[in-house]
Image (cartoon, rainbow, N blue to C red):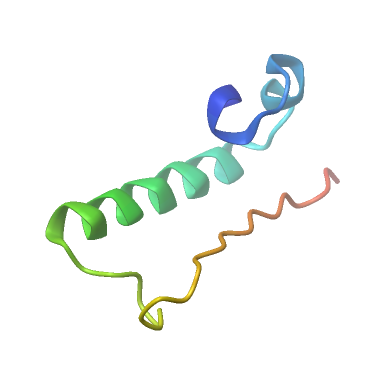
């Protein structure tokens, strides 16, 4: 997670468990699409892909 997000290990340790699981699931889905040779859903040919990850604030 540290390499994926570029955050410090302490910051990642503070994440909620469900946020980590959702991020890992998203990465797995994207990897599966790449292995299958399919572009991302809704992608236009030649358009740059941007992925934004949002972390919910702690309660």
**Looking at the image, which residue is at 35% across and 81% down?**
45
- Image height of 36 relative to 41, above or below: above
Q: Which quadrant holds the N terminus?
A: top right
Instruction: Tell which of 37 and 59 is nearer to you.
Output: 37
**Looking at the image, which residue is at 76% across and 24% down?**
11
Side of 21 where 30 appears, left or right: left
**Looking at the image, which residue is at 49% across and 65% down?**
49
Side of 55 where 53 appears, left or right: left
Q: Where is residue 22 in the image (x, y as percent from the top left)?
A: 50, 49
Instruction: Tell which of 35 and 12 is nearer to you.
Output: 35
Q: Where is residue 37 in the image (x, y as percent from the top left)?
A: 16, 62
**Looking at the image, which residue is at 40% across and 76% down?**
46
Side of 59 where 51 appears, left or right: left
- Which residue extends farthest front? 46
Rendered image quadrant of residue 54: bottom right
Rendered image quadrant of residue 33: bottom left
Instruction: Tell which of 42 and 57 is nearer to you.
Output: 42
């Amino acid at each position: 997670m540290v390499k994926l997000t570029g955050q410090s290990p302490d910051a990642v340790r503070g994440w909620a468990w469900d946020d980590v699981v959702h991020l890992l699931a998203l990465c797995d889905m994207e990897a599966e699409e790449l292995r299958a040779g399919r572009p991302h859903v809704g992608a236009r040919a030649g358009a740059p892909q941007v992925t934004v990850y949002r972390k919910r604030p702690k309660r």
